Image (cartoon, rainbow, N blue to C red):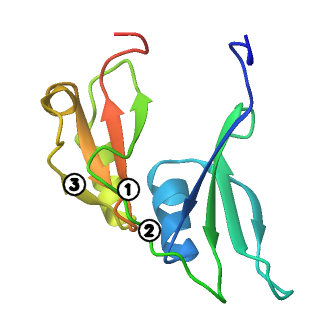
Amino acid sequence: MIIDAQPRVRVARPSRDLVAAERFYVDGLGLDVLWRSTARARGEHDLLMVGLTDGTWHFELTRDPERPVEPVPTVEDLFVVYLGAPVREDQVERLVAAGGTRVTAHNPYWEEYGVTVADPDGYRLVLCSRTWGH
């Protein structure tokens, strides 16, 4: 086995606007800012890391001010959060107020068991009413 069941995980994605991404993931979803840096030296990226302070994973959102990479999300690029409870409408409204867009899931499973909200870059967050493993 190369990894164990509790690895540290970082998911990195490009972003058009780190301020908008922070508003969505921090104000909307409730994640913490774990690290932030603004490129001050040639060849370095602007960077925002969000996650849960005591978590074993985080998102690294990047923007290269010299050579920006346009995000190219597909309908299957999902970040799924298993709530283990029905998705409340106020949770969805909070994400929309923070810059998200409620969308219809491409996969009917996510439509049946959750709500899908696109972040400001078009990547999809699924709030799933089920628990992990179902």
Write down the residue under mark 1. Answer: 123
Q: CA distance from mark 2 to mark 3?
A: 18 Å
Q: Amino acid at mark 3?
A: Arg
Residue 82 shown left or right of residue 4 in the figure: left
The C terminus is located in which quarter? top left
**Residue plotted at (27% across, 36% down):** 88
Q: Residue 119: where, in percent of width, then height?
A: 38, 60
Residues tagged 3 and 1 counted as in contact (Cβ below 8 A): no
Q: Residue 20: where, in percent of width, then height?
A: 48, 72
- Provide the secondary structure element on which disc 1 rests: loop
Q: Amino acid at mark 2?
A: Pro
| Most foreground residue, 10 or 34 | 10
| Most foreground residue, 90 or 47 | 47
**Residue plotted at (73% across, 24% down):** 7
| Among numbered discs 3 and 1, the one appearing first in the sequence | 3
Label 2, residues with CA under 10 Å away: few <14, some 14-19, many ≥20: some
**Residue plotted at (73% across, 75% down):** 45
Q: CA distance from mark 2 to mark 1?
A: 8 Å
Within the image, what quadrant is residue 85 found in?
top left
Write down the residue under mark 2. Answer: 71
